Each structure stands twice: as structure tokens, then as C-alpha cells.
Image (tube, helix red, strand yellow):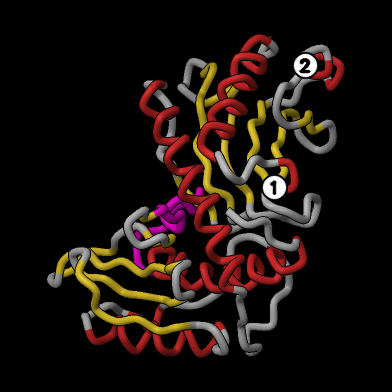
């Protein structure tokens, strides 16, 4: 993979972040209310290099909306068959919303209920402004998400109680959660989270992370030497592997090395 300028990655990431709000809006507004907003989480589709919604079902079958990183296009499928698509480059989120509602109405989805009222705060975007992406940045982000999905899949298969791999439209991270301890009501009291963020306000580049909750004392982390990555000592406890430090020629091996070394260290400190 060719290394991409951070500013180019950031611009593309922000356009993607706006567009996936459209994808998550469909199940959020159509499926029964979920106080955790889990219905709006997205899945990575390896075949389409895309993030897609959880299915909404009616007499036509399973309906999903997705956003492919290959062409920066919204798409709608019915029973995994392509129904409609719209390239978003040069179009606004508002235009995408109008198109999506029109196409969903054709397959009997009550699309008048779909809106962009979010149950969380994100960067204040202008949804009337045209979106633009860089093709190389799209490809780079697609490879990062794909590699992360593969590594997380292996981890989930090894941990009986690991949560499904999901992308959360709030922070735009693709992640899983491993419960370490639960209380008598089976509520999680200690956990490890593993995932990829495409970048955010605190770290302006993509990064892989492994964190532990509740937080632990930073001194406890620093007594461990990391072969790959660095400890994150602010806001949350864990380790990160920055895009600028990644071996882009051998991503999967490095991601496996990073997660495989950090998880046991955090397990050791969970008490």
C-alpha cells in the first residue's frame, strides 16, 4: 500500500463519515427502537469493500443500504442482489437522502420516516455541501478496514463471548468487544475493546487500538514494553498503532502482532 498524505486521508474520511450517516439512518428509523442504537451499527462487506446496514425485512426480503469504498457510492440490495446505486462524489448528503428515500419507497420501505436526526454528536457537517474523496485515500482506507475485519474475525473466533464486529457510525470505528468480567446481572464490568479508527479529533490519522475499561493507572501500562505501537495515556487506557507507524507492506502480520501482544498485557492489568 502506498502511504497517503494525512490531510488527504482526513478529507476523505470526513466525506465517508457524512455518507455513512445515510446508511445507518435506514435501520435506525425503520427497525424497532433500540436504546443502545445498536440497530444503526454497520457491517464490513469484504466482497464489496463496503460498510452496509443491518437488514430491514419486508415482503421483498432482506433490504440493506451500503456505501462502497471502491466507487464512493451508496447502494441498495434486496436479498444481496443489487437494486440501485448512486455515486456520491460531487453530491451532497441531502441529495443522497432524497435519492435513497425515493429508491426505498419503490421496494415498500416507509422512507418518509427516514431522517438524519442523530442520537449522538458528531462534527458539524454541512449536509448541503458536495462531497469529494481521493481515490488513493479510499483504497488505503478500504485496505485498513479489510485487514482489520480479518484480524478481528480471528480474534472473535477465539473468544467465546466476543461481540460481533461492527462499525459504529458515531466514531466510525470498526471494532469488537471482549468481556472480561460481568456482574450478577450479567452486565459487563471489565472489557477489552479492539478496533480501527480512521482518525478523529485527538488523533488525526487512522490507528488500530486495543483498550481496557475501566481505565487503569498509566504507570501500570508503561511498565510493559511494546514491540509495536505506543501506549495511549490520555482519555482512555490502552495502546495504539498509528498509520504513520504501520508497515503498509505487511499490514495483517503487523496488526496480528500488535493485538496479539497488547491483549495479554491488558488482561494482566485488569485487576
Instruction: Determine which quarter of the picture holds residue 92.
Output: bottom right
Instruction: Determine which quarter of the picture holds residue 269.
Output: top right
Locate the C terminus and report the quarter of the image it occupies: top right
Residue 87: x, y in percent? 45, 83
As for residue 129 lying within the magenta part, the answer is: no
Sequence order check, earlier mark of 1 and 2: 2
Reading the image, the residue beneath label 1 is 243
Q: Is 146 placed above or below 181 here?
A: below
The Cα–Cα distance between marks 1 and 2, rounded to whole angstroms, is 20 Å
Nearest to the observer: residue 139 or residue 125 = 139
Reading the image, the residue beneath label 2 is 225
Residue 183: x, y in percent? 52, 17
| Secondary structure beneath label 2 | loop
Whether the residues at callouts 1 and 2 have beta carbons within 8 Å, the answer is no
| Residue drawn at (61%, 46%) of the image | 248
| Residue drawn at (54%, 87%) of the image | 94
- Mark 2 crowdedness (10 Å alpha carbons): few <14, some 14-19, many ≥20: few
What span is colored magenta in the figure?
A: 30-44
| Residue drawn at (71%, 65%) of the image | 10
Nearest to the observer: residue 35 or residue 258 = 258
Nearest to the observer: residue 199 or residue 103 = 199
Q: Which mark is residue 35?
A: none
Left or right: where 173 falls relative to 82:
right
Amino acid at each position: 500500500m502506498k502511504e497517503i498524505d494525512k490531510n488527504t486521508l482526513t478529507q476523505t474520511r470526513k466525506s465517508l463519515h457524512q455518507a455513512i450517516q445515510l446508511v445507518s439512518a435506514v435501520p435506525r428509523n425503520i427497525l424497532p427502537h433500540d436504546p443502545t442504537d445498536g440497530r444503526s451499527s454497520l457491517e464490513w462487506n469484504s466482497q464489496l469493500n463496503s460498510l452496509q446496514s443491518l437488514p430491514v425485512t419486508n415482503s421483498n426480503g432482506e433490504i440493506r443500504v451500503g456505501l462502497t469504498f471502491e466507487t464512493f457510492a451508496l447502494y441498495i440490495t434486496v436479498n444481496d442482489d443489487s437494486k440501485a446505486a448512486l455515486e456520491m462524489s460531487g453530491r451532497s448528503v441531502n441529495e443522497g437522502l432524497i435519492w435513497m428515500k425515493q429508491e426505498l419507497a419503490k421496494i415498500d420501505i416507509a422512507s418518509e420516516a427516514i431522517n438524519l436526526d442523530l442520537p449522538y454528536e458528531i462534527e458539524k457537517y454541512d449536509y448541503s455541501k458536495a462531497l469529494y474523496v481521493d481515490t488513493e485515500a479510499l483504497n488505503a482506507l478500504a485496505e485498513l478496514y479489510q485487514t482489520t475485519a480479518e484480524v478481528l474475525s480471528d480474534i472473535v473466533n477465539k473468544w467465546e463471548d466476543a461481540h460481533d464486529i461492527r462499525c459504529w457510525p458515531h466514531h466510525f470505528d470498526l471494532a469488537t468487544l471482549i468481556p472480561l468480567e460481568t456482574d450478577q446481572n450479567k452486565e459487563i464490568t471489565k472489557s477489552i475493546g479492539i478496533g480501527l479508527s480512521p482518525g478523529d479529533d485527538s488523533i488525526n490519522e487512522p490507528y488500530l487500538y486495543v483498550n481496557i475499561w475501566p481505565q487503569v493507572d498509566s504507570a501500570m501500562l508503561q511498565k510493559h514494553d511494546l514491540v509495536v505501537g505506543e501506549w495511549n495515556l490520555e482519555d482512555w487506557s490502552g495502546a495504539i498503532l498509528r498509520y504513520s507507524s504501520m508497515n503498509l507492506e505487511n499490514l495483517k502480520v503487523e496488526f496480528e502482532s500488535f493485538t496479539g501482544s497488547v491483549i495479554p498485557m491488558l488482561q494482566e492489568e485488569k485487576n
